[in-house]
Amino acid sequence: MRLAITMLAALGPMQAQLIPLAKNDLAPETGKASIEGVVVDSVTHLPIRNATVALSGRTPLTAVTDAEGHFAFRQLPSGVYTVRAQANNYPTNGQFGSQFGNQEPVSVAGEDQKTTHLSLTPGVVLRGRIVDEEGTPLAGCRISPAQIRTRGAGRTLQEGRSGLTDQNGEYRIEDIPAGKYYVVAQCFQTIPMPHAFIRRDAMAVIPTLTYPPLYYPAAADLSGATRVTLAPGTELSGIDFRMAPGTGVPFRGRVQPLLPDSAIQLTLLPKDSLLLRNQQGTRVNPANGEFRFPSVRAGSYELVATTFGAPFYSARVPVEVGGTAPDPLDLVLTPAQPVTGTIRIDGDGNLPLKNTQVLLTPSGDEFVGAAPPPTAVREDLTFTMSVAPGRWRLQVNTGQGYIKSVMLGDQEVSASALEIGPAPAALKIVIGTKRAQVEVSVAGLPPDATSATVHVWAADGSDYRQNLSYNVQAPFRLSLPPGRYYACAVAQLDALALLQQDETFRKALAGHCSSVEVSEDSHLTVQIPFVAGEDLKRIADDPDAEN
């Protein structure tokens, strides 16, 4: 049996025409099959003119819809294709690139003439005004609709499409994907405070007031904020803010050692992950290593320092800020540490390991600086890499093998949350080969459905995910490492980008899927549910309501 694996990639801007061939390109394959259809507005159900439709698969092509929303691809060879539509004023679902209903897998053979119906959801317009405590318009303030998303071990507030206020303090943000959002206003102006004469030197800090971020309607944090519902194809006005200045205290210090050939970036991150994380940043004076934050509000922070370029140095220390300025901080940078490792194969010793690489990526949203490049495994199954202190996610690209266990020194650790300290470290990685074989059937498919996309992901929060094409007329089997998984099927590829990147969506969808637990070398049969498109869209619009 052959499984067709379809991955949703981010598409760049598409040309409103068939893609021309370069002189040295091979002529595209042709056949006698065709795929045609219409693209309509999901709210008005009217056809969308000039929508771009991309056909990916054996013969990639691009077309544009006519006044009736119609498109057609003809003379296609047999194969499995994905048809995907996009158009102006129909935004994708934020950073995840999803537009529910805008794509569909289509399989053709021989002289098949298939039809498909695609829909696009219109965006939302958000309008309002921002003034200061006296009612004076504030220009240059940033307004961001934001949603809570899960990353790694915690939940964070992630901003989407944003806008700026004009000279009248007014803003207008277009093409926001429909959904429920917290709206956050940030004004970066400072207000000078009365002060005596201050000698101007590198460490001098002029006392100022700043505007803390404000969450709609008038809250300092999410506990008092109200989410607004942005319905597709509508314009919501009156989301106004009256900003009030907040007091802060200066925070300064010195970085050691001096690194005259490296730029050093300092970031002050609030420990509350549901606060915006990009508000405090500064550079270090390369001549003396001094830094300063002119106005920091009371709270708990982490000060993170990173360098750009080799050799890589970093540091992260907790910082408590109260009502008075803390003592100057001496921040000691630590160079990236050597991490050595060995790999052992448990089971099939013939597992091919040529071109095997070890990869480390930041675990969740944790900022740990530059990731080390992929490191090749030597013939004796050892490797060496330089790693900055922090929490990392470990991957080993061994094909059919999987990470069975990881030892850091003499302690077993998680591959998805590998904590590297400020000293050299040694890893022992065991690669397993004894996968479970799972025969799958899908319950609740629509009567006319002949195929679906099956989504499988690990329940323990690791990176393991599969997205496979399911055909009702052929047996369907999964080969899985031991562990517990969630599995369900959908009619389209709508949810793939969300499943790949958004743990909040996966957690909400899990309640609609089957839980499957497998052990090494086991064989079992399971039935998984079909999740309808309207359910997927409801979960994507408000995943917190499902959790």
Image (cartoon, rainbow, N blue to C red):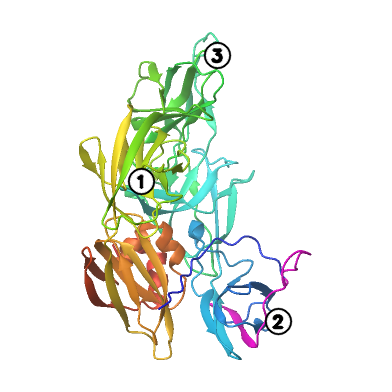
Q: Which mark is residue 287?
A: 3
User: In this view of the protein, can residue 511 be seen by the observer?
Assistant: no
Q: Residue at x 20, y 36 (%)?
A: 410
Q: Quadrant of residue 66?
A: bottom right
The CA distance from mark 2 to mark 1 is 51 Å
Q: Amino acid at mark 2?
A: Ala
Say whether disc 2 or disc 1 marks the residue closer to the N-terminus. Answer: 2
Query: What are the residue bounds of the magenta stretch?
Result: 17-44
Report helix, strand or loop for mark 3.
loop
- Whether 517 is among the magenta residues is no
State if disc 3 and disc 2 touch (CB < 8 Å). no
**Is any atom of residue 103 visible in this view?**
yes
Q: CA distance from mark 3 to mark 1?
A: 38 Å
User: Label 2, on which residue?
Assistant: 67
Looking at the rendered structure, the kind of residue marked 1 is Leu
**Picture coordinates of residue 232, whole percent (x, y):** 51, 69
Does 325 sit above or below residue 541? above
Which type of secondary structure does the marked residue at label 2 adopt?
A: loop
| Mark 2 nearby-residue class (10 Å; few <14, some 14–19, many ≥20) | few
**426 up-or-down from 142: above or below:** above
Task: Name the quadrant of the N terminus.
Answer: bottom left
Please say if the residues under marks 3 and 1 sit with CB atoms less than 8 Å apart.
no
Q: Which residue is mark 1?
A: 394
